[in-house]
Image (cartoon, rainbow, N blue to C red):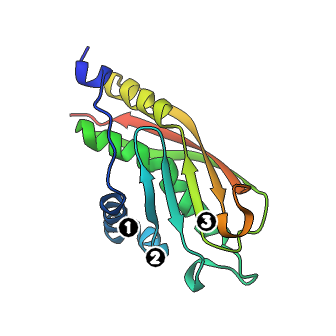
Amino acid sequence: MNSEIDSPKPFSIAPWKATAFIRLFGIFKVPLIWYVRPKVIELNEQRVVIKIRLRHRTKNHLNSMYFGTLAIGADIAGGMLAIMMLREMGANVSFVFKDIKGEFLKRPEGDVLFTCSDGPAVRELVNRTVQSKDRQNLPVTITATCPDKSGDQPVARFVLTLSLKKNAT
């Protein structure tokens, strides 16, 4: 077994670097990500927190965050840990989300924070994927909050199935 895989160095990436990375990724790969201008608030081994501001381009006709924008935030928060861990390892792995389940609890009438605290489970998934030829799946949970309006009360919860597969070399 590779000791690098078994005992990785903990990472903590400066939020501005992670924000720049995800926005550049949006420009070149998924323009809708760039369009909503996500900001990384926190990114470390344990969790990621993404912020999307409520503004003209992200809200609906009721002046709350459009559910498509909420899905983009959940997508970024659910995938960012895996992206950073895979980049850190230099692993040639592709990933997609197999499915999404969303529970909308309150209207998000302000800026929304998307938090995924599944870092240890994502690390384990990445390690299994690197060591296997088979596709590996993990449901990750993302909680959306609107601190200015609802405090720590969730406005939405998402479960996305993160699916990783080692690319043929």
Q: Which residue is mark 3?
A: 112
Q: Nearer the viewer, mark 3 or mark 2?
A: 3
Q: Nearer the viewer, residue 113 or 30?
A: 113
C-alpha distance separating marks 1 and 2: 8 Å
Residue 96: give x, y in percent of width and height. Answer: 46, 47
Residue 10: give x, y in percent of width and height. Answer: 32, 34
- Vertical position of residue 94 compared to residue 111: above or below: above
Residue type beneath disc 1: Gly
Residue 77: give x, y in percent of width and height. Answer: 50, 52
Q: Are marks 1 and 2 in contact (CB under 8 Å)?
A: yes
Image check: 102 left or right of 31? right
Dot 3 lies on which element? Answer: strand
Mark 3: few/some/many CA within 10 Å (<14, 14-19, 20+) = many
Q: Which residue is mark 2?
A: 35
Q: Which residue is mark 1?
A: 26
The residue at the point 54 percent across, 63 percent down is: 72
Q: Tell me which numbered mark, 1 or 2, is placed earlier along the sequence.
A: 1
Q: Nearer the viewer, mark 3 or mark 1?
A: 3
Residue 29: give x, y in percent of width and height. Answer: 35, 64
Residue type beneath disc 3: Val
Mark 2: few/some/many CA within 10 Å (<14, 14-19, 20+) = some
- Vertical position of residue 156 compared to residue 83: above or below: below
Residue type beneath disc 2: Tyr
Dot 1 lies on which element? Answer: helix
Q: Nearer the viewer, residue 54 or 127?
A: 54
The residue at the point 54 percent across, 41 percent down is: 117
**Residue found at the far top of this picture:** 1
* Quarter of the N terminus within the rendering: top left
C-alpha distance separating marks 3 and 2: 16 Å
